[in-house]
Amino acid sequence: MGPFLLTGASGQVGGELEPVLNELGRVAAPRRAELDLSDLEAVRRYIRLLRPRWIINPAAYTAVDKAEREPEMAFRLNAEVPQVLGEEAAAIGAVVVHFSTDYVFAGVGNRAYVETDPTGPLSVYGASKLAGEGALAATGAAHFIFRTSWVYNSTGTNFVRTILRFAREREELRIVADQHGAPTWARDLAHLTLHTIRRCETAGDCLAEARRLGGIYHASDGGETTWFDFARAFLALAQEKEPEQPWAKLTPIGTEEYPTPARRPTNSRLNCELLQRTLGFTMPAWQDSLRAAMLET
């Protein structure tokens, strides 16, 4: 099986995907020095030489606030790259797995969003990711788009690692308590991708199966919480591991008390029933994944 092309292997999701994909076949996981994704022609040449069977694309411009100042680069990486991947995949009969975000929604109400709900991004980042979804779909390539939320891992830069560091250094941390969603462990997304690939590859015609099953799916870990309660949960686990370490006191605040250049949705809940019903994959409860992840943090 393979070869596989994996973008963003140095990122949170890509870093979990590389060892998982290695179980299936040869994986090309070029780092930036080898393939600059912002060079679209270089991306085309790379794919034409490699001729991958699957293109897995967790790479993205993820600096949400910085994107407000750099919309061109955000759209290049989040919209134009998926289009190029889709065009090249369509030409060689490959399947694309692409990752998107809850930020494509306006975040109103308190109901979990389903895949067919109207979108309405509040930020350049969200708009660029939404444009990427549409651009990929328009190429006609067989594809899976997994919208996820609040991704973290035991490595890299993320909310968990940042708060743990600050909690060692400070006496008090003020955490937003009125934004709702589900933290998602990057490893769970890697396992979902592996499941999806195996589901298609074990069918008689992989490409036909990918076209039959493909489309947009919501894929965040099960349950819901707030950033404040999420922080409280992983700090409690940290205290179990290091009971002698003094940790910062957490204070809940409202979104308006923590202004950012890019607006965040207050409702990031994603309904993942379609994923379970159609692909036969259930994302773990966020609390279970957090406990497993904290064993490595």
Image (spheres, rainbow, N blue to C red):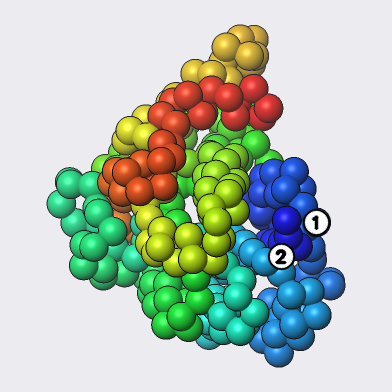
Q: Which amino acid type corresponds to the residue marked 1 in the rendered image?
A: Arg
Of residues 113 and 248, the one nearer the viewer is 113
Cα distance, mark 2 to mark 1? Answer: 9 Å
Q: Secondary structure at mark 2?
A: strand
Inspect this view and state whether residue 203 appears: yes
User: In terms of image quadrants, where is residue 230?
Assistant: top left
At x 74%, y 75%, the residue is: 51
In the displayed structure, 245 sits above or below 185; it is: above
Q: Which amino acid type corresponds to the residue marked 2 in the rendered image?
A: Leu
Inspect this view and state whether residue 100 appears: no
The label number, if any, that marks residue 26 in the structure image: 1
Residue that carries the numbered disc 2 in the rendered image: 5
Residue 237 horizontal side relative to residue 254, left or right: right
In the displayed structure, 238 sits above or below 261; it is: above
Mark in front: 2 vs 1: 1
The label number, if any, that marks residue 62 in the structure image: none
User: In terms of image quadrants, where is residue 60?
Assistant: bottom right
At x 41%, y 58%, the residue is: 213
Residue 46: x and y in percent read 77, 79
At x 34%, y 65%, the residue is: 104
Residue 288 horizontal side relative to residue 22, left or right: left
Of residues 279 and 39, the one nearer the viewer is 279
At x 21%, y 67%, the residue is: 118
